[in-house]
Image (tube, grey):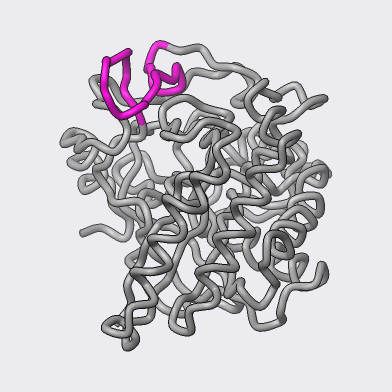
Amino acid sequence: FVFQVVVYNLPGRDCSALASNGELGPTEIDRYKSEFIDPIAEILADPAYADLRIVTTIEIDSLPNLVTNVTPRPTATPECDVMKANGNYVEGVGYALGKLGAIPNVYNYVDAGHYGWIGWDDNFTASAQLFKTAATTAGASVDDVHGFIVNTANFGPAVEPYYSISDSINGASVRESKWVDWNRYVDNQGFAQAFRTELISQGFDSGIGMLIDTSRSGWGGSDRPSGEGPRTSVDAFVEGSRVDGRIHQGNWCNQAGAGLGERPTAAPATGIDAYVWMKPPGESDGSSSEIPNDEGKGFDRMCDPTYEGNPRNNNNMSGALPNAPVSGHWFSAQFQELMANAYPPL
């Protein structure tokens, strides 16, 4: 039996957005250790659970923020600058890895963003180096890391079937297209495989594997391409070929037109341990407008369908569905759309 659990409560959680802010302030690393990680470790170490294979996803959307959303990047936020300066993301992840990794039947997978976040040259190696630092901090070692997970709670496809990063149109690489924007990857599987190699080169064990969250990456329905786009220009080719239906790769909140993706599958490709559904389909990413609540959840404009964007999505429309509840709450309209647009179809 496999039991999946998401470990997600760092101090100053989600420093680049508001919808998933957590209970702990930026400096409350001691509470994180004693009130959150220690009790989880005690529960998981119970001999009654020794026959379970416990897979932990460690701190979604945390360490990558310290690479991409800090000064001097144009995408920097004051909150991420604080978390980089105080070191509590790195210390917290290291502590969690060490405590949970000491339990023989626990397998830690660290969140590693996704191709539309870490795939650019400026982010790729720097992220792997930061993960190595976190995995050797606060009592952790690389032996406490079984692998990494990409696309957690996001919408990027596992595989783009109709174009690849090696394609060129009239002498222009697809990397020059507005959509790819000089990234070296066009989907999560290619990114995960390459990033695995980079992580091993930074000192992680050669046996690490990757997970890809495919819970909302299907992009089926009537708008899904059935073949490559026109070869009249590189932009026309990419726009006509890509199954990813988002307005911009930086859009992350309750995306209109998304569908359930590939079903959870073991070992679907080289270096990939599994496709998983880590984000429960139908759980809202955040509210479309401000909703007072006692859960510490903020209102992020990226969840507002009328929002015209920020530097993190190159000032594009948010692509979010309307009438969404606060993050983590059931969003029936989204779930119905995910089923209708599932690929492979239901």
Give the percent coordinates (x, y) of residue 299: 39, 18
Q: Say whether residue 232 is left or right of residue 217.
A: right
Q: Nearer the viewer, residue 140 or 262?
A: 140
Residue at horizontal 47 percent and vertical 24 percent from the top: 18
Q: Nearer the viewer, residue 170 or 82?
A: 82
Give the percent coordinates (x, y) of residue 87: 71, 42
Instruction: Give the overall secondary structure of the magenta segment.
Output: loop
Residue 137 is one of the magenta-drawn residues: no
Can the viewer see residue 209?
Answer: yes
Residue at horizontal 41 percent and vertical 34 percent from the top: 23
Q: Nearer the viewer, residue 123 or 20?
A: 20
Residue at horizontal 40 percent and vertical 56 percent from the top: 6
Q: Quadrant of the N terminus?
A: bottom left
Q: Which residues are magenta?
A: 286-306
Q: Nearer the viewer, residue 114 or 325?
A: 325
How many numbered markers are drawn? Answer: 0
Q: Quadrant of residue 44?
A: bottom left
Q: Quadrant of residue 112?
A: bottom right
Give the percent coordinates (x, y) of residue 262: 37, 62
Q: Say whether residue 57 is left or right of residue 2.
A: right
